[in-house]
Amino acid sequence: MAKHPLNQSGLFKLIQEAQQYQALKEHVLNLLPDNMRHHVCAVGIEHPYLVLVINEALWASKIRFLAPACLDQINETYPGLNLVNPVRIRLNNQPHNIATQAKTTRPAMPPDQETAKKMLALSEQVTSSKLALALKKLSDRAQ
């Protein structure tokens, strides 16, 4: 019996991890005041620390001040993480202008036929409509 396409390529595990980090990011954003939410670019874990990537250094001290209360609530929601203080704050050094960033990257290589088939199969099984659409578009680029 052939393995499921998701299990063959490791895509399933990667998608699960991405969804878990996205859920954690959304949880963290909901704990922050409205004016700070759009300054958090990403959330990660360097066990046992929570890592917040922010887009402006100005907000680092304000977010650090709120972090202990947020950390307590995160540990209640995700008891297996056992995260401790201090929350680590990282500054995103990427350019803020997407157009500038696109000029510095090399063009993406289209996927091969086998990978395209796996992406198309995966697009029909994921729950996120945005992810499904992105996978379909990527599979359409196959050579």
Image (spheres, rainbow, N blue to C red):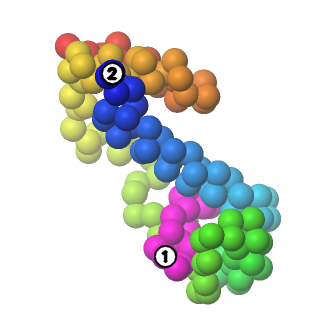
| Region rendered in magenta | 36-53
In this view of the protein, which residue sits in the foreground, 113 or 97? 113
Element on which disc 2 rests = loop
Image spot of residue 20 (x, y percent): 57, 51
Q: Marks 2/1: CA distance?
A: 38 Å
Image spot of residue 80 (x, y percent): 62, 70
From this view, report whether residue 46 is shown above or below residue 9: below
Image spot of residue 39 (x, y percent): 62, 61
Q: Is residue 59 left or right of residue 45?
A: right
In this view of the protein, which residue sits in the foreground, 81 or 86? 81
Quarter placement of the N terminus: top left
Q: Residues within 10 Å of mark 2 (few under 14, many from 20)?
A: few
Q: Residues within 10 Å of mark 1 (few under 14, many from 20)?
A: few
Residue at the disc numbered 1: 47
Image spot of residue 116 (x, y percent): 31, 19
- Chain-order first, disc 2 or disc 1: 2
Q: Say whether residue 48 is magenta.
A: yes
Of badges 2 and 1, the one in the foreground is 2
In this view of the protein, which residue sits in the foreground, 71 or 3? 3
Q: Residue at x 56, y 54 (%)?
A: 21
Residue at the disc numbered 2: 1
> Which residue type does callout 2 highlight?
Met
In this view of the protein, which residue sits in the foreground, 49 or 3? 3
